[in-house]
Image (cartoon, rainbow, N blue to C red):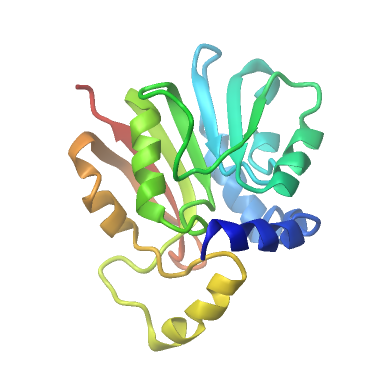
């Protein structure tokens, strides 16, 4: 995968994205993640890869200080249309190279992003960089099984899945290992499809 191809494929996905990934089991998973989250008015929240704004619809975004980015112009426009009366700042931006200061955000939310960006490790490092000490990263995504290699079938279909704009082979444990010095995993649980999709909450340790 690369950014050029992602620009093309998500232009295609944007009109039907909500029908596929903001309904059914996906919507149930999103609701479960956000139902217990209480965001404060003084917190600065970043949605990395906001997509069509599926997550924004599940929180009281009008009362919060939110910034949202996405690399796809078409996806970003969908999100903007859902939140026209809000103060959310929307930016077209690469999640692997974010134009934000170090330690800028209290909360970073990344739904179905690490499996989409060309380099998940770069994206992870950027999220850690811009997160304040004691802040948290909330992740909803698909990952390869813990402590297991990809099955032969998944290895065979992985190139085709990549062509569609996402990767079924990203390993969270590997991502965490290369960034764990300043982090603590607070939650790492199966949320959908027998553990293929997980809800992960990470906190950034105080310096």
Rendered location of residue 120, percent (x, y): 40, 54
Residue shown at 46% from the left, 87% from the top? 156
| 105 sits left or right of 83 in the view | left
User: For residue 149, which quarter of the picture?
Assistant: bottom left
Residue toward you, 14 or 23: 14
Residue shown at 61% from the left, 18% from the top? 64
Q: Quadrant of the C terminus?
A: top left
Residue shown at 49% from the left, 50% from the top? 140
User: For residue 133, which quarter of the picture?
Assistant: top left
| 44 sits left or right of 133 in the view | right
| 123 sits left or right of 36 in the view | left
Residue toward you, 173 or 94: 94
Does residue 122 sit above or below 62 in this rendering? below
Residue shown at 49% from the left, 67% from the top? 167
Does residue 56 sit above or below 170 in this rendering? above
User: For residue 81, which quarter of the picture?
Assistant: top right
């Amino acid at each position: 995968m690369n950014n050029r191809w992602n620009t093309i494929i998500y232009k295609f996905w944007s009109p039907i994205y909500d029908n596929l990934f903001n309904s059914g089991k996906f919507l149930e998973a999103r609701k479960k993640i956000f139902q217990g989250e209480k965001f404060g008015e003084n917190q600065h929240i970043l949605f990395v890869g906001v997509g069509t704004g599926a997550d924004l619809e599940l929180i009281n975004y009008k009362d919060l200080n939110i910034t949202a980015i996405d690399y796809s112009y078409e996806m970003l426009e969908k999100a903007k249309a859902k939140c026209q009366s809000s103060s959310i700042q929307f930016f077209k931006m690469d999640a692997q190279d974010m134009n934000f200061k170090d330690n800028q955000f209290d909360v970073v939310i990344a739904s179905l992003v690490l499996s989409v960006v060309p380099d998940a490790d770069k994206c992870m490092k950027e999220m850690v960089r811009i997160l304040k000490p004691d802040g948290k990263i909330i992740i909803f995504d698909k990952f390869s099984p813990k402590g297991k290699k990809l099955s032969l079938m998944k290895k065979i279909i992985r190139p085709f899945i990549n062509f569609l704009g996402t990767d079924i082979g990203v390993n969270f444990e590997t991502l965490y290992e290369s960034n764990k010095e300043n982090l603590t995993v607070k939650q790492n649980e199966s949320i959908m499809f027998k553990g293929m999709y997980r809800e992960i909450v990470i906190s950034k340790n105080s310096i």
